[in-house]
Amino acid sequence: MRREQSGLYLTAGSAPRTAGLRFPWGDMAVAVVLAAGMCLLLRELFPSVTEPWWLLTLLMLPLCAALLLLYETKCGPWLLPSGALLLLLLFLAGRTPVLSGFGCLGNDLLSLLTARTGRIYLDFAAADPDRVYWALIPLLVLCALLLSRAVWSGRLWLALPLLLPAYAAMLTGLAPCGVSCGLLTAGTVLLMMQHTAKAGDDTAGLAGRPVQLLLPLLCAALCLLAGLAVKDGLSTELAETVAQRIHEQRYDQTTNSMPEGELKNLPAWNRNDTPALELTMEKPGKVYLRGQIYEVYTGSRWEAADTKDTAAYKELFYWLHKDGFYGQSQIGTASRWALTAAEPLAMTVKNLTACAAHGYYPYALYGSGLLDAAQIGDTGLPAAEELRYLTGSVPEWYQLQRELASGQGRQEIQSYLELEQAYAAYVKAMDLQLTQESWSVVKRQLSLPEGSRTISEIRNIIYAYLGENLTYDETVRTGNGNGDFLQYTLEKSGRGYSVHYATAAVLMLRYMGVPARYVEGYYLSAEQAARYAAGEPITLTEQNAHAWAEYYVSGVGFVPFEVTPGYIDNEDVDIGASIGDGDTENTYVSEQQKFVEVEQPEEQTEQEQDRAVFSLEVKYLLWLLLLPVLALLILIIVRRKRLHRALRAIDEAGDKAAIAMRYGYADCLLHHSTVQPPEGAAEAAALNREALFSPHAMNAEQRRCVDDYAARVLTACKGNWTLWQKIRYRLWNCLY
């Protein structure tokens, strides 16, 4: 008999290792798989490591082989602490290059986080890419130490520092670690099998081969599910639809009338009286409340800027935000530096039933206290109720541009304009992109001659085209399938509402060289605002939901461009006098822009897509719910079955063997409790010694005495254990 934390063993323990030095070929095979997975993971997480993963594996394997050989000797137990001490001494000796190397690796992780989250994570300034191997070499040595020790001893917890980063990166989508996770999982399975084989008999303990294989197999299943969840095994179409379903469940408080960028199979306009926002204004007037900003047109939907693309501008936005420049409040910032800056007004915006994924802000937002300094770009603004803003129209904001130009001699204005020029470069890179198909459609429809145009001319061209070729219709259903939305709207349907008008306007502006974006939010007209007094609550319903275009004005920022019939303000139509047609700052040249290649998915009906998505959601839900439950049930069943088998073996054994095993069982129970041995402990111990060492036979009365003692021990232990201990020892350790 021997005691283990994991359960009760009734047979002899594992055979000792063969004396003398031998090469552990089986251990080495496991080490090869784990080392390959670890080195591949290093390459996936750290782009600064340029050597191929197989070369890193070859560098690690000789060290693993040497360590495995040394573990066979008497110095084996000292290898891990001595190796860690040696690494510490080496670090202290060359801490500057080593720290620089680790800083470089840290910068790689920060870059991955930035690309994943769209947030600013500052790099380590002292990191030198040329010194990355000063950190990589001790990292490989440390991995070899842990790996070889885990393989030799069969202790999985020593391999956890190697396994956890892979699974964490996979589950969070930080890096595509499918292959490395697979290798590490396979290595873990081999490790378990190898350790179980060394233990000798498959029935050696209550935790035998099936249980030892359960954990790595469970990890493998979770790894597979995680890989599918990060779109490695799903079509883009289904992945986007699943994400949309999650978004609806999380943020859409009621039926949202806005399509949230979705243009494929667009339904009729759902205008209703459902309260969406409650607005109070110090001075009620016309206002656009920007909700979500979309910058990427795919042909079937509008999307926010990809975080992988915006991550390249991390340093730019850090510099801008540090100096108080934010794209969301640019008009307000410009007004502070203008010669005739207006006083800001107060506004509160309370979300009632609108989409809660973002906030709703006026254009001339004043101040940056509510804005997230770590956020890259202008999308994904958080919700905020109390705001300050500046009133004004598009002509007035162009006048603001002229005031800034006239005051360039002032140092503060010059500093602002330098920041604005840097931000404008980002805007031009992100908001001039077109798909090949949309560029071709606009070119066919407008048929414009070559040459430069003022913004006033561009606006008039778009007004004239949309007024002649697109009919306002709120009942239209855009069944464009997988085709290009703009082509269907302009060349087939010829009908639409604000979503259609805004999309067409944005793409036409981009075609003519003007940075532009598509916006969804809420609109309060001047006529509606006139009905309310200052500070009186104004309820915006889904009737006020609206989509519009916006384009970038040099020096000032993005301004709304209204092209939908019934919403066009005559004040904003003819702005030529306000702008000045001869102003070169407002002159644009039409040219072929940067195209965005979009892979069109295979044609799929809406009904088929819904069925596929529903099936996918159900499968994921069932797997995620049932897999841990099934794993736990299997574990409990196997362990309980082995316990009953062990106790039955005691009952069926002869008197002498039964006495020894029953006393060992009682001793095992006492080992997991703090109770003192009950009455009869001395007599039972004496009988156990007699059973183990005496050549004489023993009778049933002596056996019953030891059985009664074991029963008293179990009763005392159960009375001493807490409820959690009872559950643990009954279902996990399987002691009774």
Image (cartoon, helix red, strand yellow):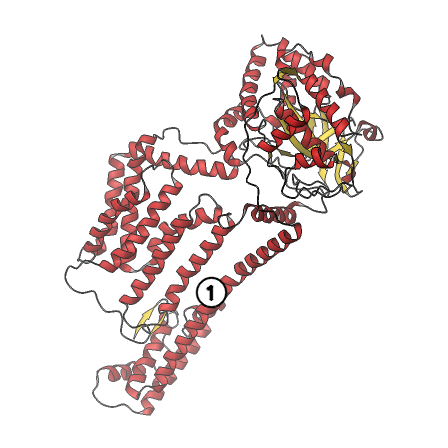
At 75% from the left edge and 37% from the top edge, which residue is drawn? 278
Horizontal relation, residue 524 to residue 688: left or right = right
* Mark 1 residue element: helix
Whether residue 84 is visible here, answered yes or no, is no
**Residue beneath disc 1:** 631
Horizontal relation, residue 698 to residue 608: left or right = left
**Above or below for 435 versus 236:** above
Q: Amino acid at mark 1?
A: Ala
Assess disc 1: are there few (<14), some (14-19) or many (≥20) residues with their C-alpha within 10 Å of its C-alpha: some
150 or 9: nearer the eye?
150
From the top left corner, tell me how far across and down residue 488 is, in percent: 68, 37
**Above or below for 128 versus 694:** above
At 59% from the left edge and 10% from the top edge, which residue is drawn? 408
From the top left corner, tell me how far across and down residue 696 is, in percent: 22, 90
From the top left corner, tell me how far across and down residue 717 is, in percent: 42, 74
From the top left corner, tell me how far across and down residue 15 is, in percent: 23, 69
456 or 371: nearer the eye?
456
Whether residue 6 is visible here, answered yes or no, is yes
Can you tell which quarter of the image residue 471 is in?
top right
